[in-house]
Image (cartoon, helix red, strand yellow):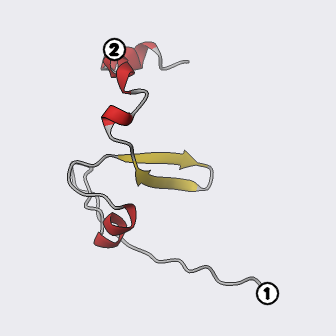
Amino acid sequence: MMAARNIKTAYSKISVKSQTVLPAEVRERLAVGPGDRLRYLLTPEGIQIEKALPESDDPFATFTEWAGAIDEEDYADL
């Protein structure tokens, strides 16, 4: 017989501006607060949320100059 996994559940709503408040349990588990960044990993199993490195520690932050709407359109098919 397979052991039951200890899974906890937390909920939040999406606002009309596509915003949500992270439940306290999630904020505590991720050790995040105001100004912190989150990273969303899209996997076949679902979405994983984790605390992201500060922008100054992000090796790809240099490339944000190419993150405009025109660039998104130009590179959409790559």
Is residue 48 or residue 31 the one in the foreground? Answer: 31
Secondary structure state at the residue bearing disc 1: loop
Is residue 11 or residue 28 the one in the foreground? Answer: 28
Residue 37 image offset from top left, x and y in percent: 31, 46
- N-term mark: 2 or 1: 1
- The alpha-carbon separation of the residues under discs 2 and 1 comes to 55 Å
In this rendering, the answer to whether 38 lies above or below 12 is: above
Total marks in image: 2
Instruction: Determine the image quadrant of residue 49.
Output: bottom left
Residue 69 image offset from top left, x and y in percent: 32, 20
| Placement of the C terminus among the 4 image quadrants | top right
Amino acid type, mark 2: Ile
In this rendering, the answer to whether 50 lies above or below 56 is: below
Q: Residue at x 38, y 73 (%)?
A: 10
Residue 69: mark in rendering: none
Find the residue positioned furthest to the right. 1
Q: Which residue is mark 2?
A: 70
Q: Which residue is mark 1?
A: 1
Residue 40 image offset from top left, x and y in percent: 44, 47
Horizontal relation, residue 74 to residue 35: left or right = right
Pointer 1: residues within 10 angstroms few (<14), some, or many (20+)? few
Amino acid type, mark 1: Met
Q: Residue at x 29, y 62 (%)?
A: 22
Nearest to viewer (mark 2 / mark 1):
1
Q: Residue at x 41, y 46 (%)?
A: 39
